[in-house]
Amino acid sequence: MKNIAISIIFCHLLVNAQETNSDNKYYKIAVIGTGYVGLVLGAGLAEFGHYVECADIDQEKVNKLNDGIIPIFEPGLSELVKKNCDNNSLLFTSDVDSAIQKADIVFIAVGTPTKEDGKADVSAVLSVVTRIGKNLNGHKIICTKSTVPIGMSHTIQSLIQPFETSTNFVDIVSNPEFLREGTAVQDFFNPDRVVIGANSEQATKILCDIYKPLLQKNIPFLITDIASSETIKYASNGFLAVKLSFINEIARLCEKVGANCYDVAKGIGLDPRIGNLFLKPGPGYGGSCLPKDTKALLSKGKEIGLELKLIKAAIEANDDQKSYIVEKIKTLLHNNLAEKTIAIWGLAFKANTDDIRESCAITIVQQLLEQGAHIKAYDPIASNNMRRILPDITYCSNKEDALEGADVLVILTDWQEFTSINTSTLSNLMKQKIIYDTRNILCELPLRTTGFTYCGLGK
Ligand code: UGA
């Protein structure tokens, strides 16, 4: 094995290197885990021409996938899956052992949820690695796609070592995922970068071959050591969380000093050192990634005796943001939430997904319930998922139903369908004409002129 120096290899260099070997190489790939990362990855790699088996121990899920039923809402995914299943380059199976045996490369895409102590629960990753060891029949690459704690490759190496022989052995690669839910398919084919952390030139070359269509599109490839690659993933999500908590704090400041946070965000974002993306204030970041990865980063810091103060502050500011929203609702209702009816539009952690993991709606609704409010909620697709967590609120089948008799309408998710509202319908249905738009998606003027109390965030 040869150490590779940290280097940024931009695509044109690699494409030139590939030109000496212009044949496309196709591989047999196993993707273990059919969550949103595994599904998008599997379907995307099949689209690149590889033969992909997506394996999952959940037989019911595999059956559904084979019947063309995609368990998550992700725009463009079901079409991509269907197309590649139809041409036999993508297959779903619960026979994990067989998928591993057939594969040249095994991508691990199982969940790494947060444990009570804030650490990532890697038990699913470890059980996949043991299975790979038991089914080692030649040289294989184990590629971690799930977000795994920094240093995980050493654990994988020591777990797999007892199974290795001179002919059956593995190379470990870290290839973190940067997809965003809701735009995951689009992100897969147009990523900002591909990061490959490896200790072996051969493994790096194979990963570059696998992603060749992206190289040919001039997407930057960053080849680095494994620890740096693992850290890049956490540092990215950590930075994004800090950026959001920063703008949310500035939004609160803006409200107090009479400034407009949108103009402030525009003004600072025009400085290319800051950048204009990820500066929209909101009710607090959620989802399965930023909250989980910031907690895991904090706990990694603790483990190695390092206090990551900025990450800690980002987490605290995010918790404060949700309480701030509740306080604001209370103020709008003259400091009394008891017996008030609150219409909530949006339960998903952001638009275009049915994912409610760590959605700010959970904490905000719970705090409102604790203070005696009644909740009538509507979300275009996330209600069924939310029912499991918040069984005792009223779920409405359309946005108008949620408004009936409401003292206030609170918008928590930036769904497109919430932007078109009819002020007279609102007036007729609501008990009090009060709107709290935490995503700033409504047009303020027509609401104010028709007698509504309209409150945006950060202005
Ligand atoms: C995040 C990262 O953006 C991805 O790059 C990463 O691959 C992914 O985590 C992961 O680790 O798997 P995701 O969780 O899908 O992606 O969601 P984001 O689009 O990052 O949004 C996170 C939260 O921030 C949402 O609650 C969203 O509403 C909020 N947000 C985002 C804002 O409040 N303002 C913004 O300007 C942007």
Image (cartoon, rainbow, N blue to C red):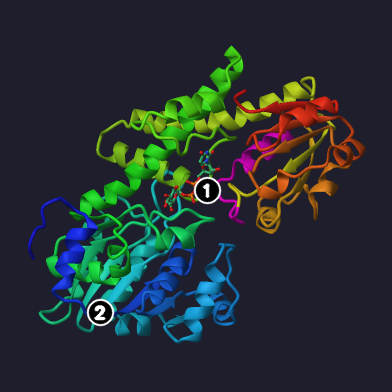
Q: Nearer the viewer, residue 14 or 131?
A: 14
Q: Is mark 1 within 8 Å of ligand 1?
A: yes
Which residue is painted at 71% across and 43% down in the image? Answer: 419
Residue 356 covered by magenta stretch: yes
Residue 134: image x %, image y %? Answer: 28, 79
Q: Residues within 10 Å of mark 1 (few under 14, many from 20)?
A: some
For the N terminus, the quadrant is: bottom left
Within the image, what quadrant is residue 173 found in? bottom left
Q: Amino acid at mark 1?
A: Gly
Q: Which contiguous range is marked in magenta?
A: 352-371
Q: Would you place residue 324 above or below residue 105 in this image?
A: above
Q: Nearer the viewer, mark 1 or mark 2?
A: 2
Q: Are marks 1 and 2 in contact (CB under 8 Å)?
A: no
Residue 407 x/y as whole percent: 84, 32
**Residue position for label 1:** 287
Q: Which mark is residue 18?
A: none
Task: Please name the residue shown 14% across and 67% down the image.
Answer: 17
Q: Secondary structure at mark 2?
A: loop
Left or right of 24, for residue 450: right
